[in-house]
Amino acid sequence: MDTLSLFALLPLIPIAFYIYRFYLAAQAKSNALRVGPAQFPELFALYQDIGRRLELKALPKLYLTNGNGVVNAFALECNRRQRYVVIHAEIAMLMPTAPEIVEFVLAHELAHHKLCHVSLWRLAIGVVPQSLVLPGLATTRAQEYSADRVALAVCPNYADTVRLLAVGPWMQHGVNPQAWLEQCEEENKELFVRISNLLSDHAVMVKRFKALKDIEMYGFERHGSMF
């Protein structure tokens, strides 16, 4: 295919993204339960409260799905009217014992919507940095840091909740946050930790936790390390 033909196909990229987002949404919804007043009402009430704190005009629909042991949640948008947050049961199961963890995760995902990280135009523009690998990883990493910052703004002093991502829901209750922070201070500037972070789309945990604790201790003028 010649260069002219490739340029001719460029306008089709947003259309392809648009269609693919509907497929991803259908795949997620069809294997999950929609959370609402009659389905996990306590989780839904928490979700609504976070939406109000973030001043979202329209709250994305929330779905709960089985992660088969995987701890994850994600935001998804097809268009401005069809927006979603999907959370794995491995996180939502902590509502009775550690609701602050669930709260921070939901706030983080709603922050992606608030910041338009999953909007179609943002994804279309992101094709360029994503195709260059390292800039693409850096873009995604920066977005994750940004969502953490917004979540922490509406959930103050919740930095410790990211322990879930380090050890999972079954061991999170035993984490010593101060000892973990000391580990982060000791290891976050090591060369191969920096390289690992550089090659990750999410900040490695020693950098991510340190970034959140820095904000709690010194304020929002502090930022997470990109390298």
Image: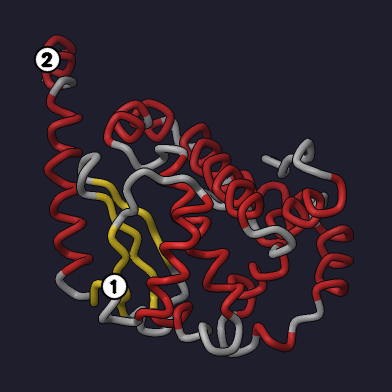
Q: Work out whether 11 lies above or below 23.
A: above
How many numbered marks appear? 2
Question: x%, y% of residue 41?
Answer: 36, 79
Q: Work out whether 175 lies above or below 152.
A: below
Amino acid type shown at disc 1: Gly
As measured in the structure, the alpha-carbon distance from the residue carrying label 1 to the one carrying label 2 is 45 Å
Q: Is residue 69 left or right of residue 181?
A: left
Q: Nearer the viewer, mark 1 or mark 2?
A: 1
Badge number at residue 8: 2
Amino acid type shown at disc 2: Ala
Mark 1 element type: loop
Badge number at residue 36: 1
Q: Please tell me how crowded label 1 is: few (under 14), some (14-19), or many (20+) other residues with Cα within 10 Å.
A: some
Question: x%, y% of residue 85?
Answer: 34, 60
Question: x%, y% of residue 150?
Answer: 59, 47
Q: Residue at x 51, y 32 (%)?
A: 135
Question: x%, y% of residue 175?
Answer: 75, 82
